[in-house]
Amino acid sequence: MSPFTWKRATTLAAVAAVTALTLSACTDGASETPAADGTYVIGYDSYFVGNTWSAQLEAEFTAATKRDADQISDVIMTQSDNDAQKQISNVQSMIARNVDAIIVTPISPEGIVPVLQQASAAGIDVILNASGAETDDYTSYVNVDDESFGATGAEWLVDKLGGSGRIIAINGIAGIPTSDLRYAGAQAVFDGNPGIEVVSTIDGGWDQATTKTAVEAVLAANPDIDGVWSQGGSMTLGAIEAFEAAGVPLVPMTGEDSNGLLKKWQSLVAAGETGFDCIAVAKPTWISAQSLENALAALSGTEVTKDDILDPEVITSENLTEFVRDDLPDSLWVNTRMTDDEITALFG
């Protein structure tokens, strides 16, 4: 999707009518919630709300249900707390309640397979939301190509360094598919450029403070760093803070479309910082809204794309000013379909 399409999608979302919707919380399979004629019961498992991206992913879904309230009789919401077994139990509860569609972000691509097969066997449409599963038993899978995400930043960094340099690689959480796939994409690029030396690979946990501490430790032993490949916006902010705290000149870094990173980037440009440059690769939080759109289309009998895989979008120094939002919180992920009021309600 081009930046024009992205901004157009955001504008359309901003003018969409917002209607009332009752959300039904569910932590067990206590009772069935039958759909009214012509409308559907949608099950949504929020895999994690421990960082701002995952919180906005859920909020994008909730905002979308309000826009599509005329097609929805109820929403069954569960929370899995990044616990694969809890997620399996939550999906089982949705099956027991006869939902029409289940939207889920698999925590364990292998472990969730049996329960997804149960859902499909029960005639429930399954939409995989921002993470895949090791099965074909789903209706649609909506995601950004995470390997391409990682490779996009890596290719930019290699080009900025002229094919040669010592770099730090910052991943999310080892074992989480998104993190592993992103680094696989980046590593393939680095392996193809022998002039690039990955001095240290760290897990920043998609957390600013954790990353700052880890990068400070790397810089203490290896102050001669030419670039940073990071797969997360908050982690890039942590890396910038670590360089500044250590008195080490800033270098080109990759990141994501978090508003806090974009604001910091803009401030460095305004201050005349020449050592730093950045690319923000986006995995949009509106994937959850697209997942709902695909679910409702499938339920209405419309054919949907089974593997709806999006190319990652990028923000560079050339288009930074088009996307940074000085008037909105740092926590915002700027590639959004939510209105400003919905964003403010979420982040304060």
Image (tube, rainbow, N blue to C red):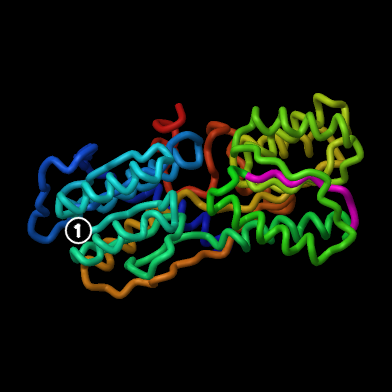
Across and down, in percent, residue 164 comes to 90, 56
Which secondary structure dominates the residues rendered in magenta? strand
Across and down, in percent, residue 228 comes to 78, 45
Residue shown at 47% from the left, 34% from the top: 50
**Is residue 162 in sight in this rendering?**
no
167 drawn magenta: yes
Across and down, in percent, residue 224 comes to 91, 39
Q: Is residue 178 left or right of residue 25?
A: right
Q: Is residue 266 left or right of residue 128?
A: right
Residue shown at 27% from the left, 42% from the top: 77
Q: Quadrant of residue 49?
A: top left
**Is residue 192 in sight in this rendering?**
yes
43 drawn magenta: no
Q: Residue furthest bottom?
A: 303
Across and down, in percent, residue 111 comes to 39, 54
Q: Is residue 309 left or right of residue 247?
A: left
Amino acid identity at mark 1 = Asp
User: Where is the C terminus found, in terms of image quarters?
Assistant: top left
- Tell me the element at label 1: loop
- Which of these two is toward me, 260 or 190? 190
Q: Quadrant of residue 213?
A: top right
- Which of these two is toward me, 156 or 43? 43
- Give the residues in magenta: 164-171
Which residue in the protein does label 1 denote?
100
